[in-house]
C-alpha cells in the first residue's frame, strides 16, 4: 500500500508540473501575440501620421506656389473694388481659394492676398491658409 500511495503521489506531482508548464507556455504565447498586435497598431498609426504630414506639406506648397504666381503676375485690384475671390482646382485634388483685398492702415497701397488650400486626407478635409501683402505691378522689382 505504501508503494501504491507513493506512485499515486508521484503521478499527481507530474500532472501538476505538466499543467504548470502548459499554463506558462500559453501565457507566453498570449503575451507575445498581444505585443505583436500593439506593435502593428503603433506602426500603422506612425504610417498614417506620416501620410497626413505629407498631405499637409502638399497643401502648403500649393498655396505658396499660388502666392508666388500672383506676386510674379503683379495682379492688383481695380480702384474702388472691395475684394476679389477666385477658386481653382489642381489635378491632385487641391482646391485653392484666393481672396484679394486692399491693404488698410500701414498696409495701404498694397494688396492683401490670402490663399486657402483645401484637400482630402482619408475621411477628413485639411485646410492650409497663407497670406501676403503684394505691391502693385509697377512697384515690383
Image: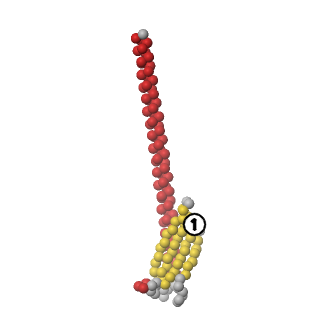
**Regarding mark 1 in the picture, which secondary structure is present there?**
loop
Residue in the picture at 55% in, 79% down: 85
x%, y% of residue 82? 53, 85
List the single residue furthest toward the top: 1
Determine whether 14 is above or below 122 in the image.
above
Q: Quadrant of the C terminus?
A: bottom left
For the question of whether residue 132 can be seen, the reply is yes
Residue 132 lies left or right of residue 91; in this view the side is left
x%, y% of residue 114? 49, 76
What residue is shown with label 1?
92
Seen from the viewer's position, the closer of residues 136 and 49 is 49
Snapshot colouring: secondary structure
x%, y% of residue 60? 49, 69
Residue in the picture at 51% in, 75% down: 115
Residue in the picture at 43% in, 25% down: 16
Seen from the viewer's position, the closer of residues 119 and 73 is 119
Seen from the viewer's position, the closer of residues 141 and 80 is 80
Residue in the picture at 41% in, 15% down: 6
Q: Quadrant of the N terminus?
A: top left
For the question of whether residue 135 can be seen, the reply is no
**Count of labels in the image:** 1
x%, y% of residue 3? 41, 11
Determine whether 123 is above or below 74 in the image.
above
Determine whether 79 is above or below 43 in the image.
below
Determine whether 75 is above or below 6 in the image.
below
Q: What is the crowding at mark 1: few (fewer than 14 residues within 10 Å), some, or many (at least 20)?
A: few
Amino acid at each position: 500500500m505504501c508503494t501504491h500511495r507513493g506512485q499515486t503521489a508521484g503521478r499527481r506531482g507530474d500532472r501538476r508540473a505538466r499543467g504548470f508548464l502548459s499554463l506558462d507556455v500559453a501565457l507566453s504565447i498570449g503575451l507575445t501575440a498581444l505585443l505583436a498586435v500593439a506593435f502593428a497598431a503603433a506602426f500603422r498609426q506612425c504610417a498614417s501620421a506620416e501620410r497626413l504630414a505629407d498631405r499637409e506639406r502638399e497643401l502648403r506648397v500649393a498655396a505658396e506656389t499660388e502666392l508666388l504666381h500672383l506676386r510674379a503676375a503683379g495682379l492688383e485690384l481695380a480702384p474702388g473694388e472691395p475684394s476679389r475671390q477666385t477658386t481653382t482646382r489642381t489635378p491632385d485634388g487641391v482646391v485653392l481659394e484666393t481672396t484679394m483685398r486692399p491693404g488698410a492702415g500701414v498696409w495701404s497701397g498694397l494688396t492683401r492676398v490670402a490663399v486657402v488650400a483645401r484637400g482630402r486626407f482619408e475621411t477628413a478635409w485639411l485646410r492650409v491658409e497663407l497670406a501676403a501683402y503684394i505691391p502693385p505691378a509697377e512697384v515690383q522689382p
